[in-house]
Amino acid sequence: MRVFKKFPRPNTIKGQLHRALVWITFIIGLCIFIPTLYIEYRQTIQHQNEEMTQYLDAQTYFFESWLSERSSDIHTIANLDFVKDYNFEKSQTFFRNFKEKTNFTDLIFVNKEGIVQFDTVTEYSTAGVGMDVKDRKYFQVAKKTKQPYITDILMSKVTKKPIIALASPILNAQQQFNGVVFGAVNLDTIDQLLHESRVGFLGQAYIIDQEGTMLTEFNNKQQRSSSNYLVDEHILNAAKKNKTSDLELYKDANNKRVLAKSKPINEGKWFIISEMGLLEAYKPFIIRILSITFCLVVGSFFTIKMMLHLSKKIEEPIQQLLTGVRKVEQGFYDYQIDEHQLAPYAHEFQELCASFNEMSAKVRKDTILLKELSVTCQLTKLYNRRYLIEQGELVFQKCLEEQNYCSCIAIDIDFFKKVNDTYGHLIGDEVLKHVANIITNSVRKIDIITRYGGEEFVILSPNTTLESAVKIAERVRKHVEHYPYYADDVEINVTVSIGIAGYGHSKNISTFYELLDRADQALYIAKESGRNQLRVCNHTGIVDTNQTL
């Protein structure tokens, strides 16, 4: 007799239960899978959108800050007295020294007729001398508007390479056009800047102008063969739409579908574009969906009877971890999961909870350290120039809004190069720390002390009149002069020159940069007047050169 395996009849309770369990499992599977598919997709898109937005914001801030600083450098050079007076020997020496400390490929002095007086391509090359550049747009704009100007890509007449020029007019005492100073920046420098600020981002970024000409290279198969390489028109049109809240989907230069975002920079003259391959963008989503599908299929056969029982054992600890992940994702790096609440659950969840808490603590510690490193000079432990630029305008604007005084003190160590040359850079660093400590102990708690660069320090004093700032500065100067640096039987006498400027409800100063510039001008006068002294830029914008305060 043949034996057949018996299956439950359809109308039996067992059969109905089997069918109900199958249908319940199937419906639950669909209820889990479809919303999960949609949520994961939306979260993936949102995550990529936020990541690319944050990346573009960081790149834009970094590049705009760099561009502003370089433009400010050229503007400052154009306003130096020996540049205005056509003191070519001193100017050329200064240009060469300054070029070595910056990203400029060349610094050029052009007279008012548009003839190059000298350049600094190399110490021994004068290839640009006598060259006529009055047909260049930067010369024409500077002459017409008397304002700084940043060009698009142009071909250098000296190096024969594509460059970007940052120009500023030279104005005489009557504010008449008297020539142009401009600095040339190679496109490789801009590439390097973008690369340095590209941290943890899997896509690529490049910069184009309004015509679609690329200002930077990027790693694609179709490398730019000349300075006139244009991106595809659809990429340029997508950038001009400037829909910062949406991701654009198109094919890139390699005919590869990408998600892209763009942002205008340089006052809308250029665009920075960020692109990420579609597969790279959706890879986490695909992996998660495949994993979820696999788990649902396997779980349908092996965990039907345990579903309700296990759901409670799994749901609550996962929710705890998801809550923790969301908190950390929102920036609450000190969030900790209560391990006692997970004690009744599986040991793996307890280990995962402990690992999460350790990770959260480490992320918090690393975040605090990174933030501190980004705004602190590691040698002197003072705030750095970046912090001053970020906070200075906020402090100044608050003083403006509250109609309070605000003063700025620029300090420069006299003959610091001589200290380095005589005793070496290690002793020079110790002297810098020595002066930084004296300054810190000589000012008030409300004063913001920064190492502005090299041997120069800047003190921003909110709610401080010009007279009070002079007292603070004089106290700093005397303390530095009266307390030499001692080490290993070596005594080094140090002095400082100080420039002071203040805002006191005057219309002559309306921004923090103007206040800083006035203090820097006063510092320059103090150094030119013999050093170890103070100079004050009064409310009229004139530096007092008749007395030492």
Image (cartoon, grey):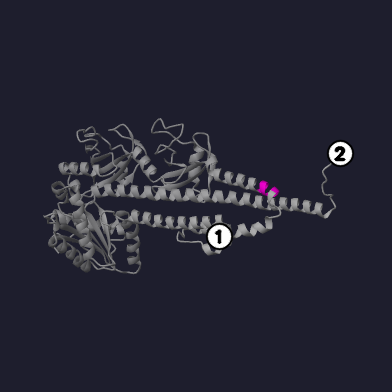
Residue 485 higher or lower than 168, as above or below: below
Q: Nearer the viewer, residue 339 or 325?
A: 339
Q: Amino acid at mark 2?
A: Arg
Would residue 452 be found to the left or right of residue 6 on screen?
Answer: left
Residue 99 higher or lower than 35, as above or below: above
Which residue: 43% across, 47% down? 264
Residue 344 higher or lower than 271, as above or below: below
Element assignment for label 2:
loop
Q: Amino acid at mark 1?
A: Gln
Farthest residue toward the front? 1
Which residue: 48% across, 44% down? 239
Farthest residue toward the right? 1
Farthest residue toward the top? 225
For marks 1 and 2, the one nearer the N-term is 2
Q: Residues within 10 Å of mark 2 (few under 14, many from 20)?
A: few
Element assignment for label 1:
helix
| Residue bearing the label numbered 1 | 320
Q: Residue 2, labelled with which disc?
A: 2
Which residue: 37% across, 44% down? 196
Residue 458 at x, y = what percent? 25, 58
Residue 12 at x, y = what percent? 84, 53
State which region is magenta: 296-301
